[in-house]
Image (cartoon, rainbow, N blue to C red):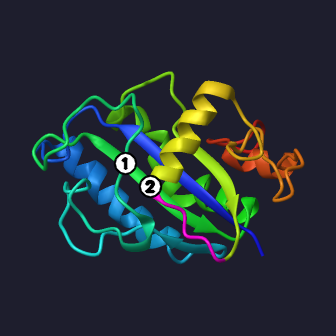
Amino acid sequence: MPRLALYTFGILKSPLADPSALTREFQESGAAVYRKISRHPGYLARAEAEVGGRGTFFDADWGAWGEFAVPTWYEKGRTAETIALAATLSLWTGLRPAFDAIYTGLHRAALNRRYDWFERTVHPSHVFWWVSDSVTPTWRDGVSRLEQLHDHGCAPHAFTFHHPFTPDGTATRIADREVRTIRTGPRPGSG
């Protein structure tokens, strides 16, 4: 059965090593989000370094997830003191579980704060693609798909929630009731 791969990438306003309260807040929020998402129905796995500490993305051993890679537009540092990025690579059972995990709860609250932590860019921040159940996507796969999405738009091999595809390459959409879950604040007349 096909699985859904998700690669996310963002450029932080300040390096991960920055001792400021805002950077600490981002890191603490991220740790809590990962704990919550790892228990979400439909979540299968995410790339985690086998050896290495925070801020050592490029030097870490990522096992089957391959060597760490970043899109061509990342121009900040690559050392523990200068890295200013956040990236994830994960596997899901399908679009709906990924959507629910990303646009609700702690992750939704973090998304609402993304411009406190991340630079605004014209580049996509995430990309999905389908893989067979025997495939572990690599960081390079994620980067390649994100760059393809940026250069050519959504297609069955690189897409977003707004323009998703089924495993057989058929364009699909997320039902209206699911889209409503991403709205924040009270609904008109509800409060």
Kindly state the secondary structure of the residue where label 2 is placed.
helix
Return the residue at label 1: 69
Rendered view: 98 above or below 173: below
Residue 136 occupies which quadrant of the picture? bottom right
Q: Which residues are magenta?
A: 134-139
- Badge 1 crowding class, 10 Å Cα cut-off, few under 14, some 14 to 19, many 20 or more, is some
Q: Position of residue 10 (x, y in %)?
A: 40, 39
Return the residue at label 2: 139
Q: Position of residue 169 (x, y in %)?
A: 85, 50
Horizontally, is 69 left or right of 182 in the view? Answer: left
Q: CA distance from mark 1 to mark 2?
A: 6 Å
Q: Earlier in the sequence, mark 1 or mark 2?
A: 1
Q: Residue at x 14, y 40 (%)?
A: 82
Horizontally, is 165 left or right of 58 in the view? Answer: right
Q: Position of residue 179 (x, y in %)?
A: 77, 45
Horizontally, is 98 left or right of 122 in the view? Answer: right
User: What is the count of numbered marks?
Assistant: 2
Rendered view: 38 above or below 181: below
Q: Main secondary structure of the magenta part?
A: loop
136 within the magenta span: yes
Rendered view: 15 above or below 58: above
As shown in the figure, which amino acid type bears the numbered disc 1?
Ala
Asked if marks 1 and 2 touch (Cβ < 8 Å), the reply is: yes
As shown in the figure, which amino acid type bears the numbered disc 2?
Trp
Closer to the camera, 75 or 124? 75
Residue 146 occupies which quadrant of the picture? top right
Q: Dividing the image into 4 quarters, which one contains the C terminus?
A: top right
Q: Dividing the image into 4 quarters, which one contains the N terminus?
A: bottom right
